[in-house]
Image (cartoon, rainbow, N blue to C red):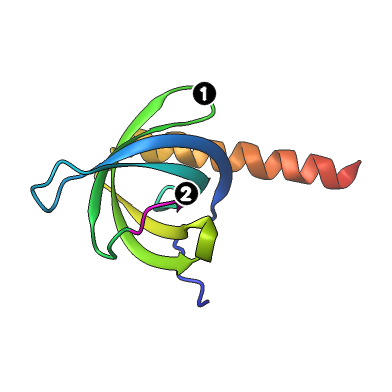
Amino acid sequence: MEERRKAKRMDLQSTITVKRIDNGKDEEVSIDIKDLSKSGIGFDCKQELEEGAIYQSSIVIWTQEVIPALLKIVRKLDRGENGYFYGAQLMGLSDIDKFRIAVYEVIGVREEDEEEDD
């Protein structure tokens, strides 16, 4: 798969419920977040979601702060019985929330470097 990420993604294990907002239906699904950057998110989901769909979310980061964001589904990988893996673009993030995620990225990189030194 072609790499199209605009920023380095860091692992973030979290399960959240997202709500679709672009089709007028009251559709909520649970997703398992796998990675996060200030421009995108990767997650697993048992339900099939439509590429281009937009979901409202509240992402809980490592400090337990909640970051509200819109997720636009940009790619989908079918994993058979295990559901789907999705890539989504983060939309509507404030500058402060982008900064919080960027700090998370820096902390994660430093922890990886320290583990390699051991």
Q: Position of residue 31 (x, y in %)?
A: 42, 43
Q: Position of residue 7 (x, y in %)?
A: 48, 57
Q: Residues within 10 Å of mark 2 (few under 14, many from 20)?
A: many
Looking at the rendering, the stretch of residues picked out in magenta corresponds to: 43-48
Quarter of image, res 30: top left
Q: What kind of residue is marked 2?
A: Ser
Q: Is residue 57 visible?
A: yes
Residue 45 among magenta residues: yes
Give the left or right position of residue 37, taking residue 55 as reference.
right
Instruction: For mark 1, give the secondary structure.
Output: loop
At horizontal 35% and vertical 36% (from top left) the residue drawn is: 17
Q: CA distance from mark 1 to mark 2?
A: 15 Å
Q: Position of residue 104 (x, y in %)?
A: 54, 37
Quarter containing the C terminus: top right
Give the left or right position of residue 108, taking residue 62 as reference.
right
The extreme top residue here reads 64
Is 40 or 80 nearer to us in this picture?
A: 80
At horizontal 47% and vertical 49% (from top left) the residue drawn is: 37
The extreme bottom residue here reads 2
Residue picked out by circle 2: 37
At horizontal 38% and vertical 26% (from top left) the residue drawn is: 66
Q: What kind of residue is marked 1?
A: Thr
Give the left or right position of residue 21, taking residue 93 as reference.
left
Residue 96 among magenta residues: no
Instruction: For mark 2, give the secondary structure.
Output: loop
Identify the mark at residue 63; answer none if there is no mark: 1
